Image (cartoon, rainbow, N blue to C red):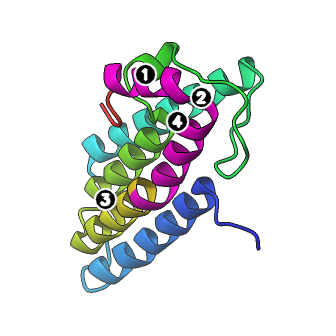
């Protein structure tokens, strides 16, 4: 069974947010984007892309459900164990702020829940099994989010 990978869930979430924003503003007929949300959206995407590039540079798998072959603890991973998820979450939160639609906030919370309790929970089990004490030490030194 093919699993829903985080970038696809991110795109689905963005699509749902676009629909929610349309529904929020259909009466007014105009959507004015909040610039702070747009800045957060771009910043989140930059964080996610930089973290992914770091994985590529170290030639390790970026795929959530593949077996990791390397423990990455440098760069953005010194500050967060999950900078890719953090970046996507910041981008979605930025989109919610940009569109100023309360329904978008619900989508952000759902995305957070999926990341925390599905993707990250799975990855943490796999990392602990594969890297043992080194991963436990990394977890003790580095926060999950920020």
In space, the residues marked 4 and 1 are separated at their CA atoms by 20 Å
State the residue at coordinates (48%, 66%): 13
How many other residues sit within 10 Å of disc 2, few (<14), some (14-19) or many (≥20)?
A: some
> Which residue is identified by label 3?
96
**Contact? badges 4 and 3 (CB < 8 Å):** no
Dot 3 or dot 1: first in sequence order is 3
Quick one: quadrant of the C terminus? top left
* Region in magenta: 117-142
Q: Nearer the viewer, mark 4 or mark 1?
A: 1
Q: CA distance from mark 4 to mark 2?
A: 23 Å
Quarter location, residue 116: bottom left
Does any portion of residue 21 appear in the rendered image? yes
The residue wearing badge 2 is 131
Q: CA distance from mark 1 to mark 2?
A: 10 Å
Q: Quadrant of residue 103?
A: bottom left
Q: Which residue corresponds to the image point at 68% horizontal and 24% vertical from the top-left?
A: 70
Q: Do labels 1 and 2 touch, CB within 8 Å?
A: yes
Q: Earlier in the sequence, mark 4 or mark 2?
A: 4
């Amino acid at each position: 069974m093919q699993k829903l990978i985080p970038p696809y869930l991110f795109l689905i979430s963005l699509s749902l947010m676009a629909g929610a924003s349309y529904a929020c503003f259909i009466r007014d007929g105009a959507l004015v984007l909040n610039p702070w949300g747009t800045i957060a959206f771009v910043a989140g995407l930059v964080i996610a892309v930089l973290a992914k590039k770091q994985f590529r540079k170290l030639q390790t798998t970026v795929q959530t459900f593949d077996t990791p072959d390397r423990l990455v603890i440098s760069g953005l991973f010194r500050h967060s164990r999950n900078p890719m998820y953090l970046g996507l979450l910041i981008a979605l939160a930025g989109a919610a702020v940009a569109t100023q639609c309360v329904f978008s906030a619900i989508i952000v919370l759902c995305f957070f829940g999926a990341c925390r309790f599905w993707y990250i929970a799975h990855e943490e089990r796999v990392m602990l099994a594969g890297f043992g004490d080194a991963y436990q030490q990394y977890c003790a030194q580095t926060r999950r989010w920020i």
